[in-house]
Amino acid sequence: MPRSCFVAIVLAGWAISPSTRAQATAELRVGMSAALSGPAKSVGQGMRSGVEAYFQLVNERGGIHGRKLRLIPLDDGYEPAQAARNVHKLLDDEKVFALLGNTGTPTAAVVVPIIQAQHVPFFGAYTGEGLLRKSPPDRYVINFRASYALETQEMVRGLTREAGIKPSEIAFFTQNDAYGDAGFAGGMKALRAIGVSDPERQLHGRYTRNTVDVEGAVAQMLDPSVSPKAVIMVGAVKPCAKFIKLMRKYGYRGLFVNVSFVNADALLDELGAKDAEGVIVTQVVPPIDSDLPGVAEFRERVKAEQRSYVVLEGFLAAKAFCEGLRLGPPDLTADQFIDAFEGTGKIELGLGTQFWISPTDHELSEDVWPTIVRAGKFRALRTWKDAVVGGRVG
């Protein structure tokens, strides 16, 4: 069924008027549809843990305007149809005020039309896809993280300008859906910006979502007639880990560069220290060992064994969401929430800079932090030259 028809059918079943979204109760309910099972579960579980950790902190301090926060997470298994059903349940049955920390691009593609029609804030989704970053922006969509376009832009810049790799020596490995398309499109835009006239000709291997069928892509990359020196990867953790292991097994010596959605910590666990050595992941939150106040607060609230970049992103996205709630009246509506956020100015998250949105810009952060595995741990990649072991790649 075409996606437009699917969304139309889903929208037709909604009966709640947007005007009823104000909550005059002592509890403010917030929904989440995320991959809590399946190959991408580490991402959904991490976002849930981060949001819950910050909500617990807020509730211990008395809530916001005297109201306690409650997260209602539902598992969509990283499947769009289930995500739409979850949103139906969250809005119709649970009467949530907003959706926070949803995970995934293909799921967002079917959820955004629903929340736009119902005037429901869709905040801090774990995706850098362009469909959430329109110009002008969708009114009820607010992003916390940098886009995939910004992540792949940093990758292309670092690989070509600092690591000395030619654009023609960069390949792509992506998930065969909207998520993979978004990352690939970002890479194409970055390559055009440095003068590549036909970037679509770059070597491009793909795999099907919710599978680990990567062998075809591996065969493409190992063709001796192409020999890429770096592979930009836009995928989920298990297929990306399998791809890297197989490439290493068959002698590939180039760079593996992943966007943040892969979940760096889970990728390291899947690979093990030996296969992970030198693997790069661009992050959209600061390093976990940073001395920034917002990150220090995270470490105080989350046990060491539970910390990850994904959990940190959930924690910070929840903090930004709560700062937005504080800008409005106690029993604010969705439109009051958006208006207050757009009109009040900057908010402080303890990250060394201030953040804000406006009616023409709903992107809170545009920062990207490259990291690399060295001796079994992700560390800040201060210059992309450091990624080239022994001064050469391949």
Image (tube, helix red, strand yellow):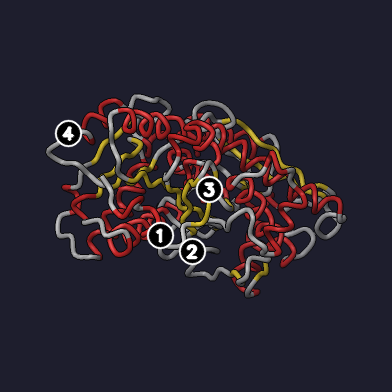
**Which image quarter: residue 153?**
bottom left
Residue located at (65% from left, 42% from top): 31
Secondary structure of the residue carrying numbered label 4:
loop
Q: Is residue 39 above or below residue 374?
A: above
Residue located at (36% from left, 55% from top): 152
Residue located at (57% from left, 51% from top): 122
Q: Residues within 10 Å of mark 2 (few under 14, many from 20)?
A: some
Secondary structure of the residue carrying numbered label 3:
strand
The tag earlier along the polypeptide, 2 or 4, is 4
State the image coordinates of residue 377 (x, y, percent, origin top left): 55, 45
Q: CA distance from mark 1 to mark 2?
A: 7 Å
Q: Which residue is mark 3?
A: 378
Q: CA distance from mark 2 to mark 4?
A: 36 Å
Proximity of marks 3 and 1: CB atoms separated by less than 8 Å? no
Q: Nearer the viewer, residue 269 or 239?
A: 269
Q: Which residue is mark 4?
A: 223
**Which image quarter: residue 308?**
top right
Taking the image as shown, residue 175 lies to the left or right of residue 83, namely: left
State the image coordinates of residue 176 (x, y, percent, origin top left): 32, 35
Residue type highlighted by circle 1:
Leu
Secondary structure of the residue carrying numbered label 1:
helix
Q: Nearer the viewer, residue 145 or 290?
A: 290
Disc on res. 150 = 1
Residue type highlighted by circle 2:
Glu
Q: Nearer the viewer, mark 2 or mark 3?
A: 3
